Image (tube, rainbow, N blue to C red):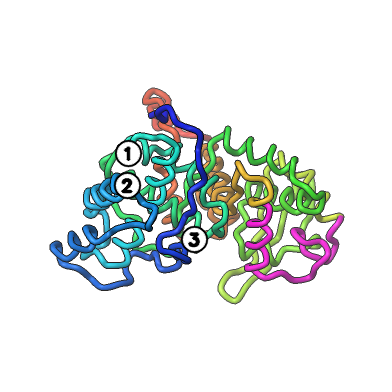
């Protein structure tokens, strides 16, 4: 649903309580005190927002969380309710400031959530933005799309953490965004990151281990070997053809150093996260995410019909659970096309 006409926006400071932004790290849906149905309603009713939160926003927020309570882990907890009222209250507050109608169809519209996370939450880490988006998606799904499944309990990091993949337009915008980054060193690093995630599906822990020496090319393409770890064997990933030049160029620069940091032999995951957060903050409007890039790579292979054993081996997956989580994001298949596939198969 398109957004309603709006007044010129005033910047809203995103604070749940004075001096403290809500912490996504507590948002696992199971922490906090379990509540009876009556206690849960009382907890929701106790929400007041910040001093600058209007009564309309407070009442809207309480009603939304009340209506979405059935998708909370049961029994609901103080943590789930507190985090939900905080996040819904923030997007409602921004929406009111921008002249939006305080109705769920407007405030929780998917495009509206995307803009809120990209523009109003850019001060948060990638982890924090993911937590905000995840909670808003669950609440919106419960109110607008009739979804009864909760996304919790689920770790915000790991193979089973599902973040919506980019559509073709979004992926193209990210590629264009990277070309405009400055200084050049930042552009080079983000170009390699994009190539290794959108073009090869590497994970955060893979990115801080692969060096220029781990890249090889032959008649069948460009390949990146991810070193073995204590919990995983070595694997080799073939890079999508569109990203081969970037990976080869990065390998030539890096040599025995890291592909994503050609002047370093080691890099922590926290340092990588800081690099990404700095790039996102330097050029607002588009937000790069390792998980969204990897999930887009996975979905492209699912759509292309890449055999599951091949895809799982290249992706470092040992079960199909994460791929199953991505199925709702795939476009529908025309019934006649589906019938042809089922009749003839793919040779």
The CA span between labels 2 and 1 is 7 Å
User: Which span of residues is magenta-colored?
Assistant: 253-279
Q: Which of marks 2 and 3 is nearer the N terminus?
A: 2
Percent x, y of residue 8 = 50, 34
- The span from disc 2 to disc 3 (Cα, nearest Å) is 36 Å
Per the model, the C-alpha gap separating discs 1 and 3 is 36 Å
> Residue 320 sits in which quadrant?
bottom left
The residue at which mark 2 appears reads as: 57
Provide the secondary structure element on which disc 1 rests. loop
Whether residue 265 is in magenta: the answer is yes
Tell me the residue that label 3 is attached to: 159
Residue drawn 63% across the image and 36% down it: 173
Residue linked to disc 1: 102
N-terminal-most mark, 1 or 3: 1
Q: Quadrant of the N terminus?
A: top left
Quick one: SS at disc 3?
A: loop
Residue 328, how many percent across, how many down?
A: 39, 42
């Amino acid at each position: 649903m398109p957004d309603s006409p709006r007044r010129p926006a005033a910047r809203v400071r995103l604070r749940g309580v004075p001096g403290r932004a809500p912490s996504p790290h507590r948002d696992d849906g199971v922490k906090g005190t379990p509540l009876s149905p009556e206690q849960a309603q009382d907890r929701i009713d106790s929400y007041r927002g910040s001093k600058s939160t209007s009564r309309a926003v407070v009442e809207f927020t309480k009603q939304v969380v009340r209506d979405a309570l059935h998708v909370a882990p049961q029994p609901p907890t103080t943590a789930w309710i507190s985090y939900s009222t905080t996040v819904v209250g923030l997007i409602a507050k921004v929406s009111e400031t921008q002249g939006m109608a305080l109705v769920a169809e407007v405030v929780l519209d998917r495009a509206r959530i995307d803009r809120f996370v990209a523009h109003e939450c850019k001060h948060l880490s990638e982890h924090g933005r993911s937590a905000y988006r995840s909670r808003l998606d669950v609440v919106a799904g419960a109110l607008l799309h009739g979804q009864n499944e909760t996304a919790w309990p689920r770790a915000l990091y790991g193979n089973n953490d599902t973040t919506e993949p980019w559509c073709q337009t979004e992926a193209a915008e990210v590629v264009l965004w990277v070309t405009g980054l400055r200084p050049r060193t930042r552009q080079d690093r983000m170009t390699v990151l994009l190539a290794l995630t959108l073009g090869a599906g590497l994970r955060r822990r893979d990115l801080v281990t692969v060096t220029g020496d781990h890249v090889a090319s032959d008649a069948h393409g460009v390949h990146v070997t991810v070193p073995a770890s204590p919990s995983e064997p070595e694997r080799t990933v073939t890079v999508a053809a569109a990203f081969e030049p970037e990976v080869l160029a990065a390998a030539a620069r890096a040599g025995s150093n890291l592909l994503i940091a050609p002047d370093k032999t080691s890099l922590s995951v926290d340092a990588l996260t800081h690099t990404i957060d700095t790039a996102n903050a330097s050029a607002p409007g588009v937000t790069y995410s390792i998980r969204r890039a990897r999930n887009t790579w996975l979905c492209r292979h699912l759509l292309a019909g890449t055999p599951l054993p091949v895809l799982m081996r290249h992706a470092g997956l040992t079960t199909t659970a994460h791929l199953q989580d991505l199925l709702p994001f795939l476009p529908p298949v025309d019934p006649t096309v589906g019938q042809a596939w089922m009749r003839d198969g793919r040779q």
